[in-house]
Image: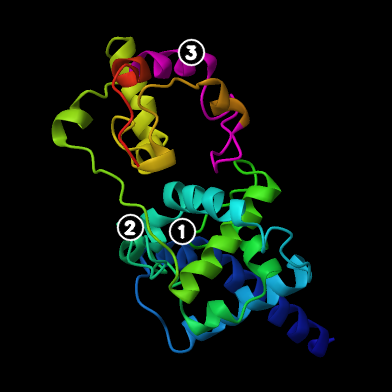
C-alpha cells in the first residue's frame, strides 16, 4: 500500500511541477534573447528533420524556368528581403532584431537543404520564430519561384532590387482615421506594399506601378510574384481606399528600367 502511495505521490508531484512550469516558467521564455548551450544546434536540427519529413522529396518544377526568377525575385523582395536581406545574408532591416535572428540563406546549412525543404518552410512557416507562413498569400508555383531565386542568391548570381525607402513626409500621409487617401496610404504601408513597389509606386523595373492601377490583382495576385490578399487581410472598403491612394501617383509616368 505504501508503495502505491509513493507512486501516486510521484505522479502528482510530476503533474504539479509540469503545471508550475507552464504557468510560471514558460512565460519567461518570451524575454529569452540569448542562446542556451546547444540551443541553436538543436533548433537547426529540428527544422531540418521536420522539413525533410513533411516536405517530401519533390524537385522544383520551376527550377529551370527563367521566368520563375523574375517572379521569385519580386516575391522575395517584397516578402523576404526585409528580414533575410536583399542578398540573402540575413541582414535585412528586421533580420538581426528578431529572436532567433533571420537565417542567412547563403549559409552552408541552408544550401544543404533540398528544394522541397525550402518550399515547405516558406509555405508553412516555423513556430516560435519570426518566419511566417506564406501558403495563404502565394500560390505553390510562386513559392517554387522563390526557392529558385534563393538558389540564385546562394550562388551569388542575383541582381538585387533596390527599393526606395519612404520619407517621413510620405509616411505621415498614412492615417487610418483620416480621409480616403490617408486611409488608403495606411493600408498601403501597413500591408507592406511599399517594400515591393516603393512608397509611391516608384520601384524600379517591373515593380514600378506608376502610371497603372491594377487593384484587381490585389485579390488574385499575379505571375509577377504579387501575392493575393483575401478579404480577411484587406476588406473591400480598405481596397477602395487603397485605390484612392494609388490614384495619387497613377498619372506619374513609370521610371525607365
Q: Residue at x 50, y 21 (%)?
A: 215
- Callout 2: helix, strand or loop? loop
- Which of discs 1 and 3 lies nearer the camera? The answer is 3
* Residue holding disc 2: 94
* Residue holding disc 3: 237
In the image, taking residue 36 as reference, residue 114 lies left or right, namely: right
Image x and y of residue 165, in percent = 24, 43
- Callout 3: helix, strand or loop? helix
Q: Quadrant of the N terminus?
A: bottom right
Question: In whole angstroms, how far apart are the C-alphas of marks 2 and 1?
Answer: 10 Å
70 relative to 99, above or below = above
Q: Earlier in the sequence, mark 2 or mark 1?
A: 2
Q: Quadrant of the C terminus?
A: top left
Crowding near the residue tagged with mark 3, few <14, some 14–19, many ≥20 C-alpha atoms within 10 Å: few
Q: Earlier in the sequence, mark 1 or mark 3?
A: 1
In the image, taking residue 11 as reference, residue 219 lies left or right, namely: left
Image x and y of residue 37, in percent = 44, 89
Question: In whole angstroms, how far apart are the C-alphas of marks 1 and 3?
Answer: 30 Å
* Residue holding disc 1: 130
- Which of discs 2 and 1 lies nearer the camera? The answer is 2
Q: Earlier in the sequence, mark 3 or mark 2?
A: 2
Q: Residue at x 57, y 56 (%)?
A: 146
- Tell me if residue 175 can be seen: yes
- Residue 233 belongs to magenta span: yes
Residue that sits furthest to the top in the current view: 179
Image x and y of residue 166, in percent = 23, 38
Characterize the magenta stretch by its predominant secondary structure. loop
The range drawn in magenta is 221-245
Amino acid at each position: 500500500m505504501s508503495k502505491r502511495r509513493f507512486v501516486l505521490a510521484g505522479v502528482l508531484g510530476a503533474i504539479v511541477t509540469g503545471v508550475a512550469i507552464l504557468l510560471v516558467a514558460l512565460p519567461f521564455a518570451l524575454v529569452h534573447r540569448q542562446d542556451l548551450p546547444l540551443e541553436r544546434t538543436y533548433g537547426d536540427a529540428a527544422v531540418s528533420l521536420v522539413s525533410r519529413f513533411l516536405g517530401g522529396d519533390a524537385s522544383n518544377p520551376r527550377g529551370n524556368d527563367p521566368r520563375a526568377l523574375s517572379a521569385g525575385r519580386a516575391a522575395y523582395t517584397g516578402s523576404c528581403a526585409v528580414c533575410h536581406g536583399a542578398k540573402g545574408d540575413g541582414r535585412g532591416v528586421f533580420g538581426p532584431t528578431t529572436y532567433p535572428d533571420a537565417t542567412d540563406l547563403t549559409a552552408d546549412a541552408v544550401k544543404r537543404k533540398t528544394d522541397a525543404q525550402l518550399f515547405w518552410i516558406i509555405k508553412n512557416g516555423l513556430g516560435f520564430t519570426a518566419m511566417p507562413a506564406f501558403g495563404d498569400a502565394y500560390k505553390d508555383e510562386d513559392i517554387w519561384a522563390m526557392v529558385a531565386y534563393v538558389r540564385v542568391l546562394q550562388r551569388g548570381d542575383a541582381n538585387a532590387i533596390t527599393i526606395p525607402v519612404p520619407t517621413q513626409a510620405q509616411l505621415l500621409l498614412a492615417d487610418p482615421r483620416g480621409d480616403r487617401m490617408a486611409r488608403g496610404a495606411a493600408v498601403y504601408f501597413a500591408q507592406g506594399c511599399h517594400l515591393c513597389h516603393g512608397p509611391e509606386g516608384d520601384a524600379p523595373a517591373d515593380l514600378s506601378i506608376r502610371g497603372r492601377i491594377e487593384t484587381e490583382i490585389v485579390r488574385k495576385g499575379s505571375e509577377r510574384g504579387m501575392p493575393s490578399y483575401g478579404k480577411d487581410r484587406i476588406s473591400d472598403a480598405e481596397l477602395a481606399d487603397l485605390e484612392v491612394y494609388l490614384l495619387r501617383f497613377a498619372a506619374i509616368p513609370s521610371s525607365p528600367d
